[in-house]
Image (tube, rainbow, N blue to C red):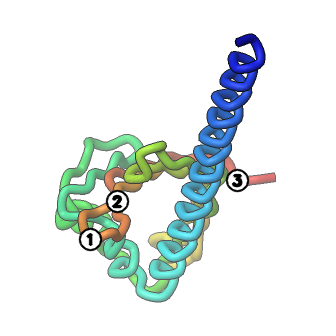
Amino acid sequence: MRSKLLLLILAVSTAAMFVWNLQLQAQSSGADRLRKLEAEFERATAERGLDGFMSYFNDDSADLPSGANIVFGRDNIRKELEPWGADVSLTWKPVKAEMAASGDLGYTFGNFVFKAKDKDGKLVSHYGKYATVWKKQPDGSWKVAFDMGNSSPAPR
């Protein structure tokens, strides 16, 4: 009787460790997926400017711009970001990415550099931090649910 109990405890413990390991692997691959998505998002922005940037937003996305009201909807976000000329450059790198256990929601945050010409035509760099919440769409694609950024000092 005692050996059966020990065997049962061992089996349950082994199963629990197996499930826990699978969850850790799923979280790790989810974070990797989000980092890859961020790289694709940045590449689309570099190649196509505002059109590339906006291609990752859903119709009901929200933007939380620094020092301004929340902007709802892809079309309104686009209006807030115009004019986005050929001289504009936006690059960013995630510091952290995490996927929900459900696998349909995740977030990233990191640092960005926004470059544009000032009123005198001089190229100026603005530094900041961002956070993006990603949501898996019914078709399996991923879109920005909401995005926010704010200023920070230049990196040292």
Q: At which x and y percent is residue 97?
A: 58, 51
Q: CA distance from mark 2 to mark 1?
A: 8 Å
The count of marks equals 3
Where's residue 131, x and y in %?
49, 48
Q: Do labels 1 and 3 touch, CB within 8 Å?
A: no
Q: Amino acid at mark 2?
A: Lys
> Mark 2 sits on what residue?
136
Q: What residue did someone put label 3 on?
A: 154
The answer to whether residue 72 of the structure is visible from this angle is: yes
Q: Earlier in the sequence, mark 3 or mark 2?
A: 2
Q: Which residue is mark 1?
A: 139
| Quarter of the picture holding the N terminus | top right
Cβ–Cβ under 8 Å for marks 2 and 1: no
In the image, residue 55 sits, relative to residue 34, either above or below, namely below
Q: Residue at x 32, y 53 (%)?
A: 145
> Any mark on residue 113, and which?
none
